[in-house]
Image (tube, rainbow, N blue to C red):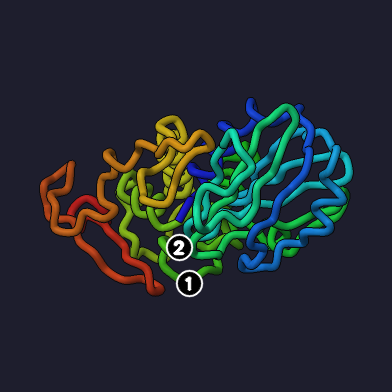
Amino acid sequence: MPELPEVETLKRALTPLIVGKTFDRAVFTRPDLRFPIPTETLERELSGKRLRGISRKGKYLLLEVDSGAMLWHLGMSGRVTGRDTPAPQEKHTHAVFCFRPELYLHFVDPRRFGAILWVPKGEGHTLLDSLGPDPLAPSTTGQTLYDQARHCRGPVKNFLMNARRLAGVGNIYACETLFEAGISPRRGAHRLSLKTWDRLLACLRKTLEKSIAAGGTTLRDFYSADGTPGYFAIDLAVYGRENAPCPACKTPVARIVQSGRSTFFCKTCQK
């Protein structure tokens, strides 16, 4: 699943490509995503409009025009690639966005958990309104997370992955961050001190920024806007490495299941 770094990477790749360009038209080949694509609304609101900017909130992208923003979510397997033709090149192409001069963005999503929606200017959206703070936002501090976690009785791993608590952190980066911080994924979120939350947030930002700089992770479904994969997966310390030696102490990496998701960690280094 594309996580925050993958979405931020896509945003940074798209910005010089399309910001300032004009939407010509949109071609919807399969509007049957998790939420039906509002094709008529998007065609009406985007046609002939200049793209003013692209912003990110958690794992969501907002492509902004004067009257509002088109909201994208990549779901489990979505990707966006630039092409030199509006003709769909892949079986699971759901939409093609055509810009002037000729540039075509293809939204591909084999598993159909992604979203292409419309947010009118000045209005919120239910998918965005419930999101917690963004870990990369300067306004997010260790105190922010400490205050939220005080009444949270679940493990810290679940806290990190709860989008209502913290936007955009998925399984890969939760595992990697907890390893970097030396914190067991089993520890109760409410038991962490303010000092520990400061350290954890610093490690989370370090992990996310490292991945963004490298272009995201090389999981099979993620590609950047130019079609190239990310390159962070080779540096993963624990995720997906069950029984491999811990890079710090050589203890075999352990795997447990938390809330139906695999958690990878080092029993020696993480307390």
Query: Picture quarter containing residue 233?
Result: top left
Residue bearing the label numbered 2: 189
Residue 257, relative to residue 27: is it above or below? below
Residue 103, relative to residue 95: is it above or below? above
Where residue 20 appears, x then y in whole percent?
76, 27
Q: Residues within 10 Å of mark 1 (few under 14, many from 20)?
A: few
Q: Residue type at mark 2?
A: Ala
Q: Residue at 59%, 50% (x, y): give it.
A: 107
Looking at the image, residue 242 sits to the left or right of residue 122; the answer is left
Query: Picture quarter containing residue 240?
Result: bottom left
Residue bearing the label numbered 1: 153
Q: Residue type at mark 1?
A: Arg
Residue 74, relative to residue 231: is it above or below? below
Distance between the Cα atoms at labels 2 and 1?
7 Å
Q: Are marks 2 and 1 in contact (CB under 8 Å)?
A: yes
Numbered tag placed on residue 44 in the rendering: none
Quarter in which the N terminus is drawn: bottom left
Q: Evaluate whether residue 146 shows in this view.
A: no
Where residue 187 appears, x then y in whole percent?
36, 64
Q: Residues within 10 Å of mark 2 (few under 14, many from 20)?
A: many
Query: Picture quarter containing residue 85?
Result: top right
Q: Residue at 63%, 62% (x, y): give it.
A: 30
Where residue 248 appears, x then y in whole percent?
17, 42
- Secondary structure of the residue carrying tag 2 is helix
Q: Nearer the viewer, residue 64 or 190?
A: 64
Q: Evaluate whether residue 248 shows in this view.
A: yes
Q: Nearer the viewer, residue 193 or 22?
A: 22
Looking at the image, residue 37 sits to the left or right of residue 240; the answer is right
Q: Residue at 61%, 68% (x, y): give it.
A: 34
Q: Residue at 40%, 54% (x, y): give it.
A: 174
